[in-house]
Image (cartoon, rainbow, N blue to C red):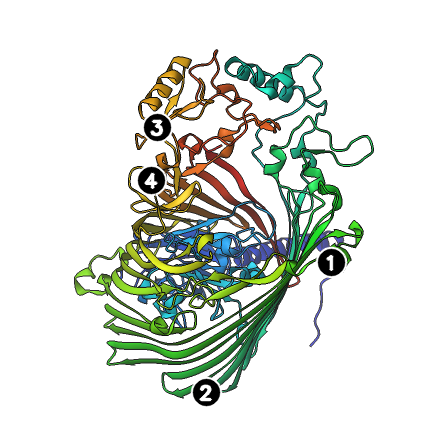
């Protein structure tokens, strides 16, 4: 076949090209239109009861495209393609993903996520689901911990656990914080809770220093007898269980690195008077003193023409001793696991400077947690931690710097440190050495075997070793006799814990569940110490060699030894019927070597009942309630606030007429008994609106009997002391915790937690023997400004009540006349004058003395708690934690600052509101040049209420890069405090 192709002209070719181009453009547009056309998907979201869900987040996975369901659960969204995946997210429900495919209508049922209710809580020798807890437990998760910028593990509980008070005295690096769970229960012993680290009880709270906060998986605070009784004789002050991180099966190695740099500073500084301002104030006090005491030698010397009694210095000692308080910390870890093993390894370093010259801390910690599945029924593991701490403390403080005379220079004309009245100045005192090196090891090896279905046996052996070396030195230029002095202290402690535990879990008939734990435990402890001190070192520079001290005698050398053992058996049984009714029984039988044979053993039982009302049939229509549980419990716990040999006679080395001698330092009491606390608890747990809001309300009464007190015998009867059971104390209170998810949508997640607590402490009984009876017949134990008094809180303030400020000499004369009518010479000494406080003669004997002292206030707050907020917007996170206290009194000594003849520094607190002839309506008494410390009275007690921004953290998650997740953050602690306390 012959085809004849027509000959194309130039114009024809051009026309054909335009036609082809037009066709191609149309085809391309149609193709692009088909490719870019989105798919509209709609549907309805319901729960498993067919109720529509409002506010469900529906997001195209991997994009920012999203929407939320309406009141009827309906939604509509445009997706790019058939391969798009829709994510359905809603608080309290499991997240679900659906591939669009050819669907344009997607109806989905979200299932309830019981994670919060099924959250595992560590309860001692085992775990339990949160919804099955019958006792009172506060839990702190790793997520909570990561938001807190702290170097002390115990302080993590502050504001996050209801009923827990955390306090620190000076803020120096390495200082141990004080923790109180539901009030104090012991008169003389430690009121700290028992700490349990990965299942091992530790006696010394400083063991927590060997744990980096980033290593912690959870902290569970057992507060009532039902939860804590399994630790028996050591659980009266509560139990804090610290669980560290572990690896996960089938997870590739994960590396974590955290670095932070922090600077601490003192926000609130009182104005410290120095220079001419201080000298003018001292001269004013001198003139006011001479009005009523014309012969006062100090005042006359200050005001004498040409007097050099006041120096010409202009030293702000506060500024001279402070330093930039930088804190650098690095935490690194690796974790992971295969099907047969799991591991977690971490290293941490802390380098912290204190706010005072010479204060610093260096801490290094390491941890290895390893679990291995040898066989399907056999597992072994180990938890090991090592820690080293180097702490230096100077011989000065901010408080001492405030009190030193500012008219004195730091150095004299020879460049030596100036001293006043044989007292070294604050800068010189920074050269004092107080160095402590502490080494700690805690290791546990364990094995667990499945004996039968639901029955397991676990055996563990834990060994801890502590080595402490402390060295103190005071250079020669700090001593009036120009002799350097020093001391060394060595301490070694060894502890072994051997636990053997059977665990049994069984369910039958779909309605019954039993969870039981039983075991035996043996603990042994041995500690040895050696100390030596000396003076007159050959050179200050060789202070590390105490052998260079020429003055060392037998009296300067001592050894200490203590040992104790604890043998225990314990059991806990939980029974659950129909997931509605829960019963718990716990008992522990302890035998302690610290008591005599008659009282060596003690039994500590507890029982609890809970009713999950939300599981009842009559609650099925109350759809907004997810969980509602009432619980009650009662039980007994104890404490062993004794030294190792309290039941034995002890002798201490001494000397008599330069000859070696022994003195009777302790009279043994073989009748001494355990301190026992009987506690009654009630509580209500709830979760509503798909677990969006959860909370706990509870109350308790805790009565502690057989409190131990060390009686001191007079030296005329050979002295010494004896421990005796002397009294009882009661703590009762209320607690409330509420957590809510306030906002949750595609971009924003905002949750908050509020906890409140009220605890009332009262000494209900004290023996009269050994007590001091004041004028009103109240038995008082103790002699300081805070004492123990029957009918009052422990640590109540003890002082003199007053009738205000004396306004005239006539009133002084009236008081002295009253004293004479009672057979006394003076009402309040021979120097009573206008401007002083008129103390109340409570026993009406005509004179002011110690028998007139009364309880003038309580340090305990009426309400305390915390508020935390976690706000997330896309990649930004803002976390804030607030702490507060309502009520309670706290002493501020500068309220009664006096000016002795040696003179001191002054702060500008109340100085302009001091009584004088020209200021008779003043709030505070006159400040005369007078030796002696003013009597303690209510005037120096101030309302300790406060509201504090405890923690603020702003963070940003950088987009993932080459498999690395990175977060940068800035945080601050104690940024502001609102309070009337000075």
Asked whether, in this view, residue 379 is left or right of residue 436, the answer is left
On screen, 852 above or below 684? above
Q: Are marks 3 and 2 in contact (CB under 8 Å)?
A: no
Could one spot residue 39 in this view of the protein? no
Of badges 4 and 1, nearer the viewer stands 4
For marks 4 and 2, the one nearer the N-term is: 2
Q: Is residue 514 visible?
A: yes
User: Which of the 4 image quarters holds residue 674?
Assistant: bottom left
Label 1 vs 2, first from the N-terminus: 2
Q: 509 or 36: which is nearer to us?
A: 509
- Which residue, given by chain and number where applicable, does mark 1 sit on? 546
Disc with the residue nearer the chain's start (4 vs 1): 1
Does residue 958 sit above or below 406 in this rendering?
below
Residue on which the image places disc 2: 377
Residue 371 quadrant: bottom right
**Could you give the CA–CA distance between mark 4 and mark 3, rounded to whole angstroms?**
13 Å
Local SS, label 2: loop
Q: CA distance from mark 4 to mark 2?
A: 68 Å
Q: Secondary structure at mark 1?
A: helix
Of labels 3 and 2, the one closer to you: 3
Give the residue drawn at x 41%, y 32%: 937
**482 displayed left or right of 65:** right
Residue to which mark 3 is pinned: 840
Q: Secondary structure at mark 3?
A: loop
């Amino acid at each position: 076949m012959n085809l004849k192709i027509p000959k194309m002209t130039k114009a024809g070719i051009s026309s054909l090209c335009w036609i082809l181009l037009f066709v191609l453009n149309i085809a391309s547009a149609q193709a692009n239109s088909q490719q870019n056309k989105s798919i509209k998907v709609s549907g309805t979201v319901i729960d498993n009861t067919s109720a529509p869900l409002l506010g469900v987040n529906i997001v195209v996975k991997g994009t920012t495209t999203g929407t939320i369901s309406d009141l009827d659960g309906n939604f509509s969204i445009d997706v790019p393609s058939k391969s798009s995946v829709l994510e359905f997210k809603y608080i309290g429900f499991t997240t679900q993903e659906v591939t669009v495919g050819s669907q344009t209508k997607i109806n989905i049922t979200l299932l309830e996520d019981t994670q919060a209710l099924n959250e595992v809580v560590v309860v001692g020798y085992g775990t339990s689901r949160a919804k099955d807890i019958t006792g009172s437990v506060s839990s702190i998760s790793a997520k909570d911990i990561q938001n807190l910028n702290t170097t002390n593990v115990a302080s993590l509980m502050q504001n996050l656990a209801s009923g827990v008070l955390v306090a620190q005295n000076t803020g120096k690096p390495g200082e141990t914080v004080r923790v109180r769970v539901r009030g104090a229960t012991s008169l003389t012993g430690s009121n700290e809770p028992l700490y349990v680290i990965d299942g091992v009880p530790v006696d010394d709270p400083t063991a927590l220093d060997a744990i980096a906060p980033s290593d912690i998986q959870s902290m569970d605070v057992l507060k009532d007898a039902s939860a804590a009784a399994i630790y028996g004789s050591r659980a009266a002050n509560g139990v804090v269980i610290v669980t560290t991180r572990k690896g996960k099966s089938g997870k590739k190695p994960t590396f974590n690195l955290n670095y932070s740099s922090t600077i601490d500073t003192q926000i609130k500084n009182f104005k410290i008077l120095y220079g001419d301002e201080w000298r003018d104030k001292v001269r004013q006090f001198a003139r006011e003193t001479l009005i009523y005491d014309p012969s006062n030698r100090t005042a006359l010397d200050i005001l004498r023409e040409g007097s050099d009694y006041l120096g010409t210095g202009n030293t702000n000692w506060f500024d001279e001793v402070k330093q930039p308080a930088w804190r650098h910390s690095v935490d690194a870890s690796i974790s992971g696991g295969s099907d047969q093993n799991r591991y977690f390894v971490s290293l941490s370093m802390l380098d912290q400077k204190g706010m005072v010259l010479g204060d610093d801390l260096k801490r290094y910690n390491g941890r290895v947690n390893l679990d291995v599945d040898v066989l399907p029924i056999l597992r072994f593991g180990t938890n090991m931690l090592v820690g080293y701490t180097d702490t230096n403390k100077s011989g000065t403080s901010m408080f001492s710097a405030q009190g030193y005379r500012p008219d004195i220079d730091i150095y004299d004309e020879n460049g030596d440190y100036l001293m006043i009245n044989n007292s070294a100045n604050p800068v010189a005192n920074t050269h004092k050495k107080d160095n402590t090196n502490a080494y700690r090891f805690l290791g546990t090896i364990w094995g667990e075997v499945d004996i039968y279905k639901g029955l397991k046996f676990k055996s563990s052996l834990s060994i801890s070793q502590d080595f402490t070396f402390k060295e103190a030195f005071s250079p020669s230029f700090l001593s009036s006799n120009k002799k350097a002095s020093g001391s060394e202290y060595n301490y070694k402690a060894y502890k072994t814990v051997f636990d053997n535990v059977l665990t049994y879990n069984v369910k039958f008939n779909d309605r019954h569940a039993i969870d039981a734990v039983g075991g035996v435990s043996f603990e042994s402890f041995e500690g040895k110490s050696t100390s030596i001190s000396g003076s007159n070192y050959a050179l200050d520079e060789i202070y590390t060699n105490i052998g260079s001290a020429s003055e060392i005698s037998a009296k300067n050398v001592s050894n200490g030894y203590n040992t104790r053992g604890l043998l225990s058996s314990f059991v806990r049984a939980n029974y659950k019927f129909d997931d509605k009714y829960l019963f718990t029984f716990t008992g522990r039988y302890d035998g302690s070597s610290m008591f005599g044979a008659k009282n060596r053993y003690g039994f500590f039982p507890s029982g609890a009942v809970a009713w999950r009302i939300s599981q009842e049939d009559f609650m099925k229509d109350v759809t907004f309630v997810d969980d509602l549980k009432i619980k009650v419990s009662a039980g007994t716990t104890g404490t062993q606030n004794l030294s190792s040999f309290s039941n034995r006679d002890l002798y201490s080395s001494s000397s008599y007429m330069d000859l070696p001698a022994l003195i009777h330092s302790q009279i043994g009491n073989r009748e001494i008994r355990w301190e026992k606390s009987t506690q009654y608890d009630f509580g209500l747990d709830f979760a509503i609106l798909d677990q969006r809001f959860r909370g706990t309300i509870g109350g308790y009464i805790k009565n502690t009997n057989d409190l131990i007190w060390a009686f001191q015998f007079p030296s005329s009867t050979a002295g010494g002391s004896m421990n005796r059971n002397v009294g009882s104390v009661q703590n009762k209170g209320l607690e409330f915790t509420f957590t809510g998810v306030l906002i949750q949508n595609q971009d924003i997640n905002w949750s908050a937690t509020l906890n409140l607590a009220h605890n009332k402490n009262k000494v209900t009984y004290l023996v009269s023997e050994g007590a001091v009876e004041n004028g009103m017949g109240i038995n008082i134990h103790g002699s300081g400004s805070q004492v123990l008094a029957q009918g009052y809180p422990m640590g109540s303030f003890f002082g003199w009540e007053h009738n205000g400020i004396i306004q005239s000499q006539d009133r002084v004369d009236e008081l002295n006349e009253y004293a004479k009518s009672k057979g006394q010479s003076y009402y309040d000494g021979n120097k009573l004058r206008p401007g002083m406080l008129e103390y109340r003669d409570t026993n009406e004997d005509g004179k002011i003395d110690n028998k007139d002292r009364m309880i003038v206030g309580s340090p305990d707050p009426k309400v305390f708690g915390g508020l935390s907020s976690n706000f997330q917007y896309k990649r930004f996170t803002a976390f804030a934690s607030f702490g507060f206290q309502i009520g309670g009194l706290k002493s501020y000594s500068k309220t009664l600052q006096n000016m002795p003849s040696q003179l001191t520094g002054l702060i500008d607190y109340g100085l302009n509101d001091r009584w004088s002839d020209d200021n008779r309506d003043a709030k505070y008494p006159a400040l005369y040049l007078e030796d002696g410390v003013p009597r303690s009275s209510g005037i120096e007690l101030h309302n300790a209420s406060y509201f504090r921004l405890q923690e603020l953290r702003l963070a940003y998650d950088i987009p993932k890069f080459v498999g690395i997740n990175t977060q940068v953050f800035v945080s601050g602690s104690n940024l502001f405090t609102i309070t009337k306390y000075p």
